[in-house]
Image: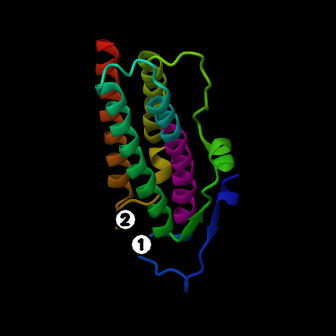
Amino acid sequence: MITYLLNNISADQMEKTINLSENNKQSIANNLAILLADEYVLYTKTRNAYWNVKDTAVYDIPVFFEIQFAQLDDIIDRVAKRIRELGYYTAASLKIFSQTSHLYETICGTTDSHSFMQGLLFDHESIIRYLKTNNQLFLNEQNNGDDIEDFISQIMLEHEKMAWFLRTHIKQV
């Protein structure tokens, strides 16, 4: 599936900017494509919560979801650009994202903020686990001059912060 997601860009199409072997670029790009799919599914689920939360009498709940989907939008953009920097294209297809993602699209009958937040928290924690578990897949070469470790760590920290905010709101709701 991943090979379908990524198509190598020829050397004359894109200047090589990082010091990685081709195998490691492919491996990192493949794992970033999975991360991108996860991020996009989570973004969509957060948008769904924003649009459909029924307890909107509390002003901060829709605003809270809006802040979170804006943060996810930024992460999506950075991950997609990182794949391009590695010299690959990535498909921006909802079908491919849903087939590639570790996250599941759920249609639940409840639209209360507590239920939405619990589901989103589970997904943030799933992404954090994926990044921690597959950390070595992103770091095949040590001291390669690339900043992929910092890049992945930063995304993990952002998800940990968003998860913390969700936990805090769940306790209040």
- Report the front residue among 139 and 34: 34
Span of residues in magenta: 24-42
Q: Residues within 10 Å of mark 1 (few under 14, many from 20)?
A: some
Q: Magenta span: helix, strand or loop, mainly? A: helix
Instruction: Specify the amino acid type for callout 1.
Output: Asn
Pointers 2 and 1 in contact (C-beta within 8 Å): yes
Placement of 85 over or under 131, stated as above or below: below
Placement of 66 over or under 91, stated as above or below: above
Residue 137, image x and y in percent?
Answer: 50, 50
- Give the labeled residue for mark 1: 19
- Give the labeled residue for mark 2: 146
Instruction: Name which residue lies at 41% across and 41% down.
Output: 69
Residue 10, image x and y in percent?
Answer: 60, 80
Instruction: Name which residue lies at 55% across and 83% down.
Output: 13
Tell me if I can see residue 12 in this picture: yes
Magenta-drawn stretch contains 26: yes
Tell me if I can see residue 139 in this picture: no
